[in-house]
Image (tube, rainbow, N blue to C red):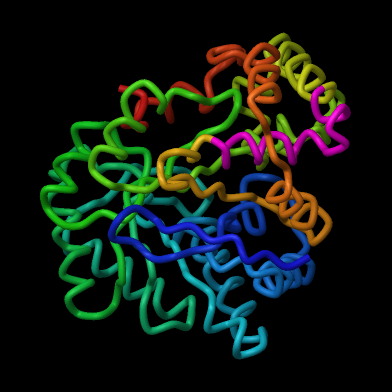
Amino acid sequence: MTTTHTRTLGTTGPQVSALGLGCMGMSALYGEADRAESIATVHAALEAGVTLLDTGDFYAMGHNEMLIGEALRTAPAARREQALLSVKFGALRGPEGSWLGYDGRPAAVKNFAAYSLQRLGVDHIDVYRIARVDPDVPIEETVGAISELVDAGYVRHIGLSEVGAENIRRAAATAPISDLQVEYAIITRDIEREILPTTRELGIGITAYGVLSRGLISGHYTPDRQLGAGDFRAHSPRFQGDNLRHNLGLVEALRKIADEKGVTVAQIAIAWVLSRGAGHGDDIVPLVGARTRERLSESLGALDVILDAADLAAIEEAVPAGAAAGTRYPAAQMSHLGTEH
C-alpha cells in the first residue's frame, strides 16, 4: 500500500505524510519488541510514503534513536532521503529506567541535540521539541536555544509537546512553531477546550499521539492480557480493573460502527482523528505507534476511510467526550502535562 496523502505542519512547518510513525514502542514501555521487525516496519512505512518518523532521545535511553538510525542507513537511498525526523528531548532518566524530571536549559538543549544527531546518523533534525516544559526554565529560553540550532542548521523546525495555551503563546512569540505534539483520540479530547483553538489561532499544527490510546481502542486489546513490569500500561489508570472493563465497553460500541462500514476499530479511531482537521487546513497529523508491518498496514488503511456526518454522529453517541474511565497517566506524571492545566 502506498499513500500520497500529505499535510503541512502549521503555517511554518514542513509538508509531511498524513500519518506519521511513532517509534517509541519499538524500544520501550510496551513490552518486548522485535528489532528486525521494527526495522522492517520503518522500511515498510517509508516504502508506503510515510515520511514523518517520531522519536525521543530518552526512549530506552537512546536505543530508539539508534534503531531509527540503523533503519535509515539500511533503507534505499531514495526512501532515506524522504524521511523527516521529529525528536523530543529533555526527559532525564536514571540507569535503572527511572524518570528524574526535565531539563530545558539552553546548554542542555544543545547537548541533547548533539547526541541525537550522532545516534540518528544525520546532520539535522527536522522538528525538535522538549518533551515537557521544564518548570524551572522559562519556555522562551528553551525555544530560544532551539532557534539558535535552527540558525546554525542543526534543526529545521521548532515543535512543542504537551504545552498549555499560555506557554504555546509565549513560545510562538519567541520563534516560529510548526506543531504541538499532544495526545488526542476518541477517548482523549481535552485539547478541544483550549489547546486546539489556540494552535489554530496561531497557525500551529497538531501531531496527535496516542490515537489508539496505547492499544486500548485498537480493537485488539483483551481484558485478560498479561503485561510485564516494564509495560507502561501495567500502571496506567485506564488499563486497571473497572476502568478497563468500562473502556473496553466503549471499544465494543465502536466495533459495531466499524463492522457496519467494513473496517476495523483501529481504522475508525485513526480516521476520526484525521477528520478533526477537516475545515481547518487538515492541521492534524496522527502518529500511529505500529511496531509490526501488519499493524502498519492496518493503520494506513485508515487513510481510505471516509466518515460522513452520520458516521461522526454515531461515534459521538457511542463515545461522547469524557466517556473514558481513568486518567491517561498515573498521578505523578499527570502533573507534568501542561495541556491538563
* Residue at figure coordinates x 27%, y 42% from the top left: 133
Quadrant housing the C terminus: top left
Seen in the picture, residue 125 relative to 273 is either above or below; the reply is: below
* Residue at figure coordinates x 63%, y 50% from the top left: 288
Quadrant housing the N terminus: bottom right
Seen in the picture, residue 67 relative to 133 is either above or below; the reply is: below
Q: Position of residue 7 (x, y in %)?
A: 48, 57
**Which residue is outermost to the bottom?**
77
Q: Position of residue 145 (x, y in %)?
A: 17, 63
Magenta region's main secondary structure? helix
Q: Is residue 56 magenta?
A: no
Q: Nearer the viewer, residue 257 or 104?
A: 257
Seen in the picture, residue 48 relative to 165 is either above or below; the reply is: below
* Residue at figure coordinates x 82%, y 25% from the top left: 255
**Horizontal side of residue 123 vs 6, given as left or right:** left
Q: Nearer the viewer, residue 188 or 320?
A: 320
**Horizontal side of residue 149 vs 19, given as left or right:** left
How many marks can you see? Answer: 0
Residue 217: quadrant of the picture: top right
Q: Nearer the viewer, residue 173 or 277?
A: 277
Q: Position of residue 15 (x, y in %)?
A: 44, 65
Q: Position of residue 40 (x, y in %)?
A: 76, 72
Q: Which residues are magenta?
A: 257-275
Q: Nearer the viewer, residue 10 or 295?
A: 10
